[in-house]
Image (tube, grey):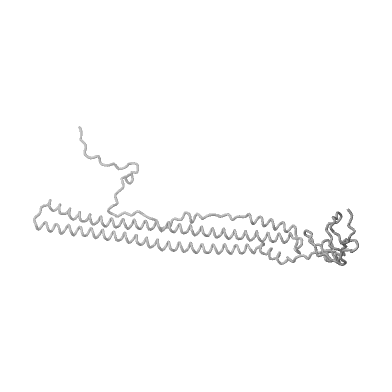
Amino acid sequence: MGIPKDENNFSGIFTNQTALLPPKTLGWRVPAVDQGSAVTDTSNTTYDAGTGYASYASSGGSGGSGGSGGSSASTKSSDAEQVRILRELLDGGFEEAREQRLANIQRVYEQGDSALLQSYDARAESLETLREDTKKSEADTSFANLGNRARESSDILTEIATQGAGETDALRTQLIAARNWSANQLEVSRAFFDSIGSNNAAITELNEDTRTARINLATQALSDQEQAWATYSNQMAASASQLGNVLANPYSDSYDAEGGADAWQAMADAATSVWDNPGISDDVMDWEGWSQPRKEEVNYSILPEYGPRPGYSDRALKRPEGSTLQKW
């Protein structure tokens, strides 16, 4: 199909053109047209009044493929100072900070453990002193009780003698003094064993509390040490990764492909390293304390054990068999 001859008639279909042309006007310009991602500047496009076709005037430079007039060389970034600082941190800076953290943790732990042991010594000595005072008090009270028994026996004998009582009555009156002594001594013994029992319970509680406190303190110190090592590993991994990125950048003035690979390997090693926790020491776990609960006896309640006689370890004592019928 041909182009219509009538210049004012543009209703025909154009098969060999991509767009419908506007009315032919000399010097008419088309605005810029957005063609996908590229923008075509049509400010220098005119249309011929005779033919009706657009003509394009070439501009001084092309935005897409020209660029020959400008500089194509890229300026490299200055990373030398950054690389120097990163290497300084990786070669010992982070390690020095880690050692200082560990030293601080160890110092605080030793101070806390020493304070616990000093407190334990003071409380244990106090309990031991109380224990000795209880034993002395029992001995004094028991001796006074014996003296009271002797006094009562003498007074009773004097009283019945004035009344003309016989020997049988005198023996019976002695039982009165003996019963009074026994009752008084039972009270002394009960008070003594109650005090010793409370003392043993206090010593046991003190040992367990101190041991638990020492274990908790050691556990906290180990946790702090593990955190210090984790912080060190994270810092090493992050800095090594940053150094590797800089060295592997071809647009950096510190470009070093092999050095970048080594830095990334150091990053991998640091990221996968974990501190080996040694656990709580046996000195703390097996600690028992120097003050221990002990069983105490009073002198009148200690009975000889039934067993081998001294010098005759192979011949045990035998109970008396009592009277037996003698046969000839």
Residue 203 placement (x, y as % from top left): 39, 58
Q: Which image quadrant is residue 71 in? A: bottom right
Q: Is residue 81 left or right of residue 193?
A: right
Residue 275 placement (x, y as % from top left): 59, 56
Q: Which image quadrant is residue 260 in? A: bottom right
| Nearer the observer, 109 or 10 | 10
Extreme residue in the top direction: 328
Q: Which image quadrant is residue 20 in? A: bottom right
User: Which residue is located at x 55 percent, y 60 percent?
Assistant: 224
Numbered circles on residues, count: 0
Quick check: can you spot residue 82? yes
User: Which residue is located at x 46 percent, y 62 percent?
Assistant: 116
Q: Is residue 26 left or right of residue 91?
A: right
| Nearer the observer, 8 or 283 | 8
Above or below, 197 against 316 in this view is below
Residue 278 placement (x, y as % from top left): 55, 54
Q: Is residue 225 left or right of residue 54?
A: left
Above or below, 322 against 131 in this view is above
Residue 167 placement (x, y as % from top left): 12, 52
Extreme residue in the left direction: 164
Quick check: can you spot residue 69? no
Q: Quarter of the image containing the C terminus?
A: top left
| Nearer the observer, 165 or 183 | 183
User: Which residue is located at x 89 percent, y 64 percent?
Assistant: 49
